[in-house]
Amino acid sequence: MTDLLRTRVLGQSPRRVDGPAKVTGTARYAGDQHVVDPAYAHLVQAEAARGVVTGVDVSAARAVDGVLAVLTPDDAPRLASTEDAELAAFQSHDVAFRGQVVAAVIASTREVAREAAALVRVEIDRQPHDAHLGTDRDDLYAPEKVNTGAETDTSRGDVATALAHSPFTLDQTYTTAWYNNNPMEPHTTTALWLDGDLALYESTQGVHTTREAMAKVFGLDPERVHVIAPHVGGGFGSKGTPHVHTVIAAMAARAVPGTPVKLALTRQQMFSLVGYRTPTIQRVRLGCDAAGRLASLEVDAVSQTSRIKEFAEQTAVPARMMYAAPNRRTTHRLAALDVPVPSWMRAPGECPGMFGPEVAMDELANACGIDPVEFRVRNEPDVEPESGKPFSSRNLVACLREGARRFGWEHRDPTPRARVESGWFVGTGVAASTYPVNRTPGSAATIRCTGPRRYLVRIGAADLGTGTWTSLAQVAADALGVDFADVELRIGDTASPKASVAGGSSGITSWGSTVVAAAEAFREEFGDDPAEGDEAGAEMPGNDAGDTYAMHAFGAQFAEVRVHVDTGEVRVPRLLGVFAVGRVVNPRLARSQLVGGMTMGLSMALHEHSVPDERFGHVVNHDFAEYHIATNSDVPHVEAHWVEEHDPHTNPMGTKGIGEIGIVGTAAAIVNAAHHATGVRVRDLPVTLDHFL
Amino acid sequence: MPFDYRRAPDPEGAVAAATGWPGVAFLAGGTNLVDHMKLGLAAPDVLVDISRLPLDTVAELPDGGLRIGATVRNADLAAHPVVRRDYPVLARALLSGASGQIRNLATTGGNLLQRTRCVYFQDLTTPCNKREPGTGCSAIGGYTRHHAILGASAHCVATHPSDMAVAMAALDAQVAVLGPAGRRVVPLVELHRLPGEEPHRDTVLSPSDLITSVDLPPLPPGTRSQYRKVRDRASFAFALVSVAAVLRVEDGVVRDARIALGGVAHKPWRARRAEDVLLGSPADEEVFRRAIDAELAGAAPLEGNGFKVPLTRNLAVSALRELSREER
Ligand SMILES: Cc1cc2nc3c(=O)[nH]c(=O)nc-3n(C[C@H](O)[C@H](O)[C@H](O)COP(=O)(O)OP(=O)(O)OC[C@H]3O[C@@H](n4cnc5c(N)ncnc54)[C@H](O)[C@@H]3O)c2cc1C
Ligand code: SF4
């Protein structure tokens, strides 16, 4: 147990430090960085989902005025490591998915590069491909572990017998769609080699993780790779692990010695090159008694991975800790397909994995005639069900109750399809949210006194637009016991000490704990009146509380849904979420994270859907006119609140991480409300109008 | 691809500049054409910029109708007081299309001649008879949510994406065209083609034909009109199905009915069979239903877009119901 930091600046809402630069357009993103006379690279992608490149004709491309070089599998330099198959650009002639990069053109302008790229002729000896995801496959396999290192399968008790003896049972299959991370800023790299050192202006969630990956790929000492990312225009996981364009930008810069190279992906290219959320198929089986107490809980999750690199979405993991049930079982199976490499997308595991079970809970609550809020309360566990650990804090019930109160749940008539207002069926629904408190080891920070009441805090963390520039400075101010204005934070650069990736909502926990440790070291060494130049640092301390306690954030989301009687059009006039996320560092930023997450959840529920065409093996609606993301008119009213939560175990700040929990459970709340409105149970996302016709 | 850019002084000059160039394209707002050039879908060798031609006015005609210049911006047309007063179906159709920014650029002529949003048409890596005749139609057996249920062929099942054109089809608009051989008038409902065996031909125009204006005939007093569009999100999305309805009811009997459907065919679909049922019949729900069913008897949905049949039926009946209610 840690003593929580005394708060003066924590809990206040200083405005974003980076706000003025962003609204005035002076904040420099990876592609905006000034470099002298850059060249531009444009990628050429495979038009077959599986095969072997038998020839690349670059003569027409080379003939275009302004073309400087062309990289192909025939002549691109060898990389030091091809261990990460996704990053092994041009190292083999094999094509493993449609859209794989098979050539790159480097030219004096972006336009010439794009023009010439269209003239590269790639011959592929096509082989039959397989891009079909389904439970009907006989080659589904159990991965060794799933994402985050969790167990693939778990089992407690005897689910079959418990289900057979339950008076109320449910056995349904739910699906979530293929979703593509679509941050506003496309993935962009500016690469430059200087005396054998590689400098990258990169749009990334982790400058140090990019450094390490590039050092390995190019066989460099990590100290010789410099990664700079002061501002990132969103990532949502897709900038959390390095992707192939970064390698290619560096290769391209090497091909034109002395010239920096800029490479920005097009929106269409992002649909095959930067990861995505796999579609999931979730079979959920529940059994409960007449009082609504679960006796049995099973989730079998199937998702896809690419044939060249495994990514195992941990879809069934949240079911392991949400509700009490003596008999329980979870499994994960994968289909390895000729598809692009899936990866992290906002709340991997929890986001898709709380869809099926939270709709199932609603279905079973209805079957027993128990209010769905009450049904969840009745299944609160005393300890984390599978590990048996006590929770460091668990306030799901408080969120459900507070949400119900604010939403006006108590007057709800549970009868489905019973309310029509001006031609719209009206209904309300609820679902729970959860997200683990993650901490990623490996960060370090330094603090230096740069003048009277001036402190420079350095840590190679990232701000994806989430507010790190501001919130981490708040942590530093309280850790040092100084004013917010006294702290100058330096992040987004490998010149600052190593920091973990901005992912898993772990930023404040990991970087914040590190900064607090550095401040303690600084105070211990220099006291309250340091001299200019005094400097101390620390690495992230361990936290054994994790051995004792299960740590998770929770939430409850309530939705009002309207479905048009004639056309089936679906609208969500109101979303309300209440969260228990530990201490809130900056309410202004926190609200923006939670409302943003819920909005993305709404978008997932109603709109987002990457449509894969199995015949070709790619997502066919790969632009913003066809891949719909919620517009302002789709999101009239989203409210996020939180309950007071004191958790002395998570970290010295008492925080739990808020970046991802907002998207968890939203889609289930909307589906449940749509059922209440219409009596139609949608089990496959997105909830489009054709379900109701 | 490098291309030649010319700015025409007047409509005649534009046509002259375009004549004899097979690879010519008129550039109006550019919101469709420039996208297509970036995607590699269009590669004109000559661009004739018509955006500054003096065709940007809306004028009332002596017969009470309206003449809309080809370069009038969609936003301006939607806000025009006469359009709002006399042709609400058109104002609403325009406002339901695209986004504010795009409507500020998009023109009357360009909107009519925008091309299908079929995802396979827009993707150079997939076969498409419209883009490359003879390569096949990828939409058949693929992603068909935005595709046709009426009038399609085995060669192409694309839909025309315009909202404005659907309203104009219901209003019996007439399109004035200036071509190398002079002026002619094409009824709007005959401007766009059905795909048949030549899906690469969207319209009856040739590349050097310039649309100069669109005339709307006057509507008799007592006529009501409205546009209903259903799409997959609340704004900034193309129609899954839309209905433009123009209705005049006297003493409970339908005296004039003009219905056009969007999102269901390769062209704005004038529902003549439905109109035949409606004319002279009582304005009641049963008749509306029978009328639209008569039209939809010819529907041939694809795998994946069968929902459009009940959707079209419900939407059309609902639009007619509302119009006839307003009447009372
Ligand atoms: C994201 C997005 C969403 C959209 N959503 C909708 C929607 O919901 N509903 C809708 O209706 N539309 C929608 N649009 C399409 C938009 O309405 C059209 O792009 C626009 O109307 C085209 O007009 P323009 O003047 O820009 O045409 P341009 O792009 O300049 O031209 C289009 C075509 O017409 C030809 N052309 C233009 N003017 C003439 C003329 N006078 N004579 C002969 N040929 C001519 C050009 O040569 C070209 O072939 C959307 C577009 C985008 C990009
Ligand atoms: S529907 Fe028409 S436009 Fe679409 S792929 Fe088929 S031929 Fe091409």
Image (tube, coloured by chain):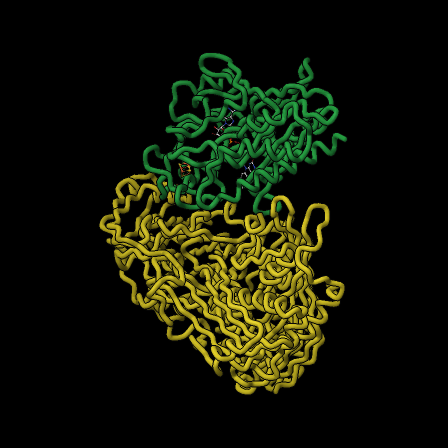
Q: Is residue A663 visible?
A: yes
Q: Residue at x 42, y 61 (%)?
A: A342
Q: Position of residue A498 (x, y in %)?
A: 48, 73
The part of the image, by quadrant, that contains residue A286 is: bottom right
What count of labels does the image hold?
0
Q: Nearer the viewer, residue B65 or A362?
A: A362
Q: Nearer the viewer, residue A222 or A556?
A: A556
Q: Residue at x 50, y 49 (%)?
A: A627
Residue A76 in the figure: left or right of residue A608: left
The part of the image, by quadrant, that contains residue A253 is: bottom left
The colour of chain B is: green
Q: Residue furthest left?
A: A54
The colour of chain A is: yellow
Q: Nearer the viewer, residue A135 or A19?
A: A135
Q: Residue at x 63, y 53 (%)?
A: A23
Q: Residue at x 41, y 45 (%)?
A: B142
Q: Is residue B82 visible?
A: no
Q: Position of residue A116 (x, y in %)?
A: 34, 42
Q: Position of residue B101 (x, y in %)?
A: 60, 39
